[in-house]
């Protein structure tokens, strides 16, 4: 029997992104492989018709998965015994694709989100779930930390927040860990203002914050040093070869979502 999921607002995006990964995985020429997403989607009683019609959202999710999987894999390859903190995890399954490459992996999200996650994913070491907001500093009390390398992933979240929220999230990370690397997905201010996500239209989830690049983000969180920006155009090149040409145009890369790498 399929499970009905009732969820609205920003947390609803986790179901849409899960579906996008599952749908891509089932293609003959799939660009990513997420069998766990397929298994979960098959158990859900949920109307995915809007997600089916939102090609922009789906392509963006796949491009982001391609880019971030590569970045996280490369980081873990060169940093042994890393503690990974996945903020706003939703139904993310990257911890399973990276199994054996980290010491601990903490998936953090709002209580209502973790409640749904727990229905489908049992995680009790080395993957753990923390049902708290990223702006609740007490979540760090639940993390076993002994001065290891810390990698913080913030994917598909920042664009729904406000600048003060971003400052607070980074402040908590700064105070909790001696040394950390943050990989955060950002959206350009232009798209924050002009783009809507069709798959969650009618919900309370609205784009509200963006930044042009990592250098601008460093002005907001000066305790962290900007290292590099990786445009999601790099993922789009894998999905649609035409982006090998479009990606040469500076404006295309400039306006696309990015994974910004910050270090402290």
Image (spheres, helix red, strand yellow):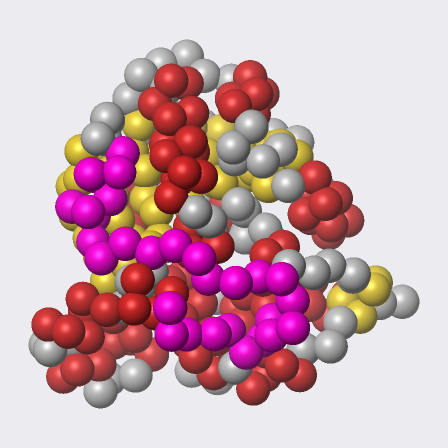
Was residue 142 drawn as part of the magenta stretch in this picture?
Answer: no
Is 177 left or right of 242, judged from the image as shown? Answer: right
Residue 239 occupies quadrant: bottom left
Residue at 58% x, 36% y is: 133
Q: Which residue is the extreme one toward the right?
A: 1
Residue 250: x %, y % from top left: 10, 72
Residue 195: x %, y % from top left: 41, 74
Residue at 30% x, 83% y is: 240
Residue at 33% x, 56% y is: 210
Residue at 76% x, 67% y is: 44
Q: Is residue 134 above or below residue 149?
A: below
Q: Is residue 165 above or below residue 197?
A: above
Residue 37 visible in the snapshot: no
Residue 18: x %, y % from top left: 58, 64
Residue 236: x %, y % from top left: 30, 74
Quadrant showing the C terminus:
top left
Q: Which residue is the extreme one toward the top?
A: 146
Was residue 196 drawn as part of the magenta stretch in this picture?
Answer: yes
Badge count: 0
Residue toward you, 46 or 68: 46
Residue 110 occupies quadrant: top right
Q: Is residue 202 above or below residue 52?
A: above
Is 171 left or right of 71, judged from the image as shown? Answer: right
The residue stretch that appears in magenta: 193-221
């Amino acid at each position: 029997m399929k499970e009905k999921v009732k969820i609205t607002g920003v947390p609803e995006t986790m179901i849409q992104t899960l579906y996008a990964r599952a749908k891509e995985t089932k293609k003959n020429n799939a660009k990513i492989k997420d069998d766990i997403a397929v298994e979960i989607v098959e158990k859900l009683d949920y109307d995915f018709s809007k997600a089916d019609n939102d090609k922009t959202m789906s392509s963006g999710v796949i491009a982001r998965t391609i880019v971030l999987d590569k970045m996280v894999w490369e980081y873990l390859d060169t940093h042994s015994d890393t503690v990974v903190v996945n903020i706003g995890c939703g139904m993310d399954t990257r911890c399973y694709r990276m199994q054996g490459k980290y010491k601990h992996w903490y998936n953090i999200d709002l209580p209502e989100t973790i409640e749904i996650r727990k229905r489908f994913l049992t995680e009790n070491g080395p993957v753990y779930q923390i049902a708290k907001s990223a702006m609740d500093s007490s979540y760090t009390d639940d993390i076993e930390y002994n001065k290891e390398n810390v990698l913080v992933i913030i994917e598909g979240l920042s664009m729904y927040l406000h600048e003060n929220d971003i400052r607070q999230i980074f402040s908590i990370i700064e105070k909790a860990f001696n040394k950390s690397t943050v990989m955060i997905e950002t959206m350009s201010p232009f798209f924050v203002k002009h783009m809507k996500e069709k798959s969650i239209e009618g919900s309370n989830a609205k784009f509200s914050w963006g930044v042009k690049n990592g250098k601008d983000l460093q002005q907001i969180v000066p305790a962290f040093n900007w290292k590099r920006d990786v445009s999601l155009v790099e993922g789009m090149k894998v999905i649609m070869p035409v982006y090998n040409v479009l990606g040469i145009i500076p404006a295309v890369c400039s306006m696309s979502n990015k994974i910004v790498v910050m270090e402290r």
